[in-house]
Amino acid sequence: MTEITYSIIEVATGLYQLKMPLPFRLNHINLYLIEDTDGWVLVDTGLNTEKTRELWVLFLNSGFFEKPIKKILMTHLHPDHIGMSAWLSRTLNVPVFISKGEWEMAQFLWKNESDTAKSLYEDYWQSFGLQGTSLDEMVSHRMHYKKLVGELPDSVSYLHANSIWTIKGREWHMLPAPGHSPEHICLWNPSQRILISGDHVLPTITPNISYHPIGLENPLESYINSLESFLKLDCEYYFPAHGPISPDLHQRIAEIIQHHRDKLAILMNSIQENITVVEAMPLLFSKDLPSHQLMFAYAETAAHLLYLAGRKLLHIEDKKILSFANYLKQKENFIENFVVPINQ
């Protein structure tokens, strides 16, 4: 049996990719180390598992670097990115930086044991059209985040969107990239024309874009808008959290937007009368999903329906149950109305 371990390679001058395993179908995460004059800036940390901790101990004791990790920077709050941040911050005695919107969402998800949170999630899933045992199962998933993360840092410093960090004489721009999460941050180095894209742009899969009980009101709109803003970047390579280092950032952005256009087209060409999120989900995803994947499928379906409603292509008949009605008369022309075309 092949031993599960980490890998570390230099991917650009002063930039290293540290690959850590994940116990999921998505079986790895790419972390990044940016060299500074007196140490390293670590971007993301991996999932909080015993195996990941063992690998971090092995890596930290390997003597690979003569300089210490001085700062930890989180692209966003999801468990595979933030999971080891508390342990690493405590072990190395270094600060953790994360955007305000991401930290507030992390705190919200961490404190979901209360009756108030349970009631909020009951209303949220009921608005999708869930009832009975299906409703109870989805509400129970509100504790999933805390179980996966294990612990959060005792304190963080806020990472401000559009701020610039100078690291060993090179500028790294903290670009806002909302959609996959409320205030995801990507790191852009214009001098080297490289982008650390986190989960915002992935080369082989599309990131989940979900509507949550708090956070972005129209996450798919936020995501598409932010993708379009990244078309301004003269990028040679982007470095994702999952998948291979890739060129052709603009082409991949076009592919991702087309992916969502296709899903929106399916909805618009299928909805004839009122439909709930639960009824619409099988139009976009398989019915036969395990419950944790079903949770994401419902939430992403809701994001697509809300996007169309925001563009006035669907009408929300009843906000309490998110019942959508299709009232567009010329469906064959709708694609031109809801997304700014990409100039390639």
Image (cartoon, helix red, strand yellow):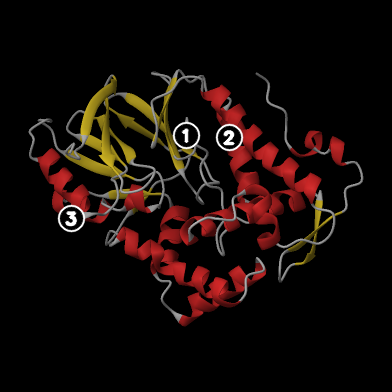
Q: Is residue 155 above or below residue 253?
A: below
Q: Is residue 49 left or right of residue 236?
A: left
Which numbered disc flags the more N-terminal residue, 2 or 1? 1
Three-letter amino acid code at disc 3? Arg
Residue positioned 11% across, 41% down in the render: 58
Kindly state the secondary structure of the residue where label 2 is placed.
helix
Per the rendering, the mark at residue 90 is 3
Q: Which residue corresponds to mark 2?
A: 227
Residue positioned 27% across, 42% down in the render: 21
- For residue 55, what is the image quadrant? top left
Q: Is residue 242 above or below residue 11?
A: below
**Looking at the image, can residue 255 be seen?**
yes
Per the rendering, the mark at residue 202 is 1
Gap between marks 2 and 1 measured at Cα: 12 Å
Q: Is residue 201 left or right of residue 323?
A: left
Nearer to us of marks 2 and 3 is: 2
Gap between marks 2 and 3 measured at Cα: 35 Å
Nearer to us of marks 1 and 3 is: 1
